[in-house]
């Protein structure tokens, strides 16, 4: 049988047109700053200072990128370190927090509420920077990539989010799997994790962004320049150029001075790779951020 087409009234058509128009305008406003950054990074600094930013480059110039890639081997090494830290930190964080969240979501866990309270308590009070520094240095992780991974691989807030999401999974699924002889690890991998894809993908995105954009841990625990991640490398390039400009050193060309184009080029170089995560995780991200909004 042929399905009858639903007739749409003129008022609803007008409403949909206005809605799409509004969403298009909002999307344009969201993407416009990034377009200005990319355009400005290829512009001449004097033109930006004189005329401001524009959608198309003014006085096409690559000076901003030349100042960053004066030492390409160091930049490539920093890229590699940032990619390694982001991938390993995200995977390690997901494993640790998924195991913790699953354990806290099970009603048969003894002292579950007490453990959950201790996890929640750390979101209100922390030991501070000095204990963290002592732990990292005493464990011999200073000037290693693990000093950039371990401190951020576990978040109490994310553990509670995973626990709350997993508690919405029907107990009947877990109980039927146990009757079939499945152990806890198999239940977690084969049943719970596939059903928890939205929250795990959302947290993976947050973790990846946090690791990729982090430069603070490197400033604390990494003194070896060969171990600098990308963000801290770019920060030091800009900081060094700023000091040169303030000192008025005449032997350096303007290509390495902290012009507006260099700052914009830093932003493009830093955000370029990580932005490709969004198309793959977008559909899960929308579901993950609405946790608890609707309950059955």
Image: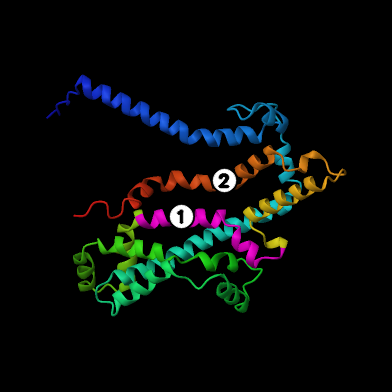
Element under label 2?
A: helix
Q: Which mark is residue 271?
A: 2
Residue at 30% across / 54% down in the picture?
A: 291
Residue 97 position within the rendered picture, expressed as x and y whole percent measured from the top left: 41, 66
The residue singled out by tag 1 in the image is 206
**Res. 138 image quadrant:** bottom right
Q: What is the distance, in whole Å, between disc 1 and disc 2 at their CAs?
A: 14 Å
* Image position of 112 (left or right of 4): right
Element under label 1?
A: helix
Residue 161 position within the rendered picture, expressed as x and y whole percent measured from the top left: 35, 61
Residue 72 position within the rendered picture, expressed as x and y whole percent measured from the top left: 73, 49
Q: Which mark is residue 13?
A: none
Residue 23 position within the rendered picture, expressed as x and y whole percent measured from the top left: 37, 31
Residue at 63% across / 66% down in the picture?
A: 220
Which is nearer the eye, 253 or 124? 124
The residue most toward the top is: 10
Graded by Cα atoms within 10 Å as few (under 14), some (14 to 19) or many (20 or more), the crowding at tag 2 reads some
- Closer to the chain start, of discs 1 and 2, is 1
Q: Which span is picked out in magenta?
A: 199-224
Magenta segment's dominant SS is: helix
Residue at 73% across / 37% down in the picture?
A: 63
Q: Measured along the vertical axis of the image, is residue 278 above or below residue 157?
A: above
Q: Is residue 130 magenta?
A: no
Q: Measured along the vertical axis of the image, is residue 293 above or below residue 147?
A: above
**Res. 168 image quadrant:** bottom left
């Amino acid at each position: 049988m042929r399905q009858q087409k639903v007739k749409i009234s003129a008022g609803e058509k007008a409403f949909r047109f206005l809605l799409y128009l509004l969403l298009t305008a909002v999307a344009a406003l969201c993407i416009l700053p990034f377009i200005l950054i990319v355009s400005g990074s290829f512009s001449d600094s004097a033109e930006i200072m004189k005329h401001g930013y524009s959608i198309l480059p003014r006085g096409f110039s690559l000076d901003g990128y030349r100042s960053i890639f004066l030492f390409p081997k160091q930049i490539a090494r920093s890229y590699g370190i940032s990619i390694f830290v982001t991938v390993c930190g995200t995977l390690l964080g997901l494993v640790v927090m998924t195991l913790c969240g699953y354990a806290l979501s099970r009603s048969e866990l003894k002292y579950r509420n007490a453990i959950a309270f201790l996890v929640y308590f750390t979101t209100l009070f922390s030991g501070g920077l000095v204990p963290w520094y002592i732990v990292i240095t005493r464990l011999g992780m200073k000037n290693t990539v693990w000093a950039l991974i371990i401190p951020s691989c576990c978040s109490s807030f994310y553990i509670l989010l995973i626990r709350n999401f997993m508690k919405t999974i029907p107990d009947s699924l877990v109980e039927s799997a146990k009757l079939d002889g499945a152990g806890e690890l198999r239940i977690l991998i084969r049943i719970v994790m596939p059903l928890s894809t939205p929250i795990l993908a959302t947290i993976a995105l947050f973790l990846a962004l946090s690791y990729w954009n982090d430069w603070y841990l490197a400033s604390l625990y990494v003194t070896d320049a060969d171990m600098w991640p990308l963000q801290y490398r770019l920060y030091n390039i800009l900081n060094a150029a700023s000091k040169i400009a303030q000192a008025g050193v005449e032997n350096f060309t303007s290509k390495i001075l902290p012009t507006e184009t260099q700052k914009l080029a830093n932003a493009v170089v830093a955000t370029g790779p990580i932005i490709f995560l969004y198309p793959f995780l977008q559909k899960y991200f929308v579901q993950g951020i609405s946790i608890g909004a609707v309950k059955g």
